[in-house]
Image (spheres, rainbow, N blue to C red):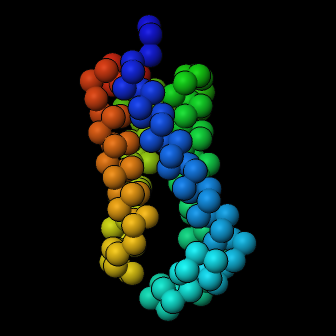
Amino acid sequence: MKRPVTLWILIFWLGFLALGGLYGGIAMLLDPSGGSLGMAGVLPLLPVANYVLPGLFLLVIMGLLPLLLIYGLLARPNWTWLESMLRQTKYHWAWTGTVVLGAALAIWLLVEGILIGFKWTIQYVTAVNGLFIVLFVFLPSVRKFYKN
């Protein structure tokens, strides 16, 4: 079965998220004060002493995980240990993981908005990115392609 065009658009948005997650995560880990990102003044509003934990979250969940999901969506490897955990979804693990990532991104932005407000351009860009990920993963052509 040929990959639908809408899948390639989903791959683009996952890649865009990965680039942002890798950049933000690495920047926060290299400078835990947040100064290099202009975020040092926000730190007192957060329940953490520095940006190490948010940096790790961005690096792993918003940076590396989308890359793994892109691989899974394109190569469609049959990893039985993942498939067995997600059997009830009736979709390939990479499709299910993309749905979960979209939900995690929404929760991350919600918590971020509560803690520090929603006033930076990157927050809006990330929100639109997440919206497109959720929109494209649920399109019938993409769902059909990954249905087990």
Is 137 above or below relative to 40? above
Residue in view at x 69 percent, y 77 percent: 31
Tell me, yes or no, if residue 88 can be seen here. no
Which of the pair 39/134 is nearer the observer? 39
Q: Would residue 40 be seen by someone viewing this image from the given angle? A: yes
- The residue lying furthest to the top in this view is 1
Give the residue drawn at x 34%, y 43%. 132
Q: In this view, does 146 lie above or below 113?
A: above
Classify residue 127 by image quadrant: bottom left
Quarter of the image that includes the N terminus: top left
Q: In x, y percent, where is residue 83?
A: 51, 29
* Rendered location of residue 86, percent (x, y): 45, 34
**Observer-nearest of 92 and 125:** 125
Q: Who is closer to the viewer here, 118 or 71?
A: 118
Q: Quadrant of residue 24?
A: bottom right
Residue at (28%, 29%) from the top-left corner? Answer: 139
| Apparent side of residue 39 relative to residue 138 in the rendered image (left or right) | right
| 123 over 81 or under it: above or below | below
Q: In this view, does 63 lie to the left or right of 1?
A: right
- In the rendering, at what x and y percent does residue 15 appear? 53, 42
Residue 40 image position (x, y, % from top left): 56, 86
Residue drawn at 62 percent across, 56 percent down = 22
The reply, left or right, for residue 49 in relation to residue 14 is right
Q: Residue furthest left?
A: 140
The quarter of the picture where residue 80 lies is top right
Location of the C terminus by quadrant is top left
Q: Which residue lies furthest to the right in this view?
A: 30
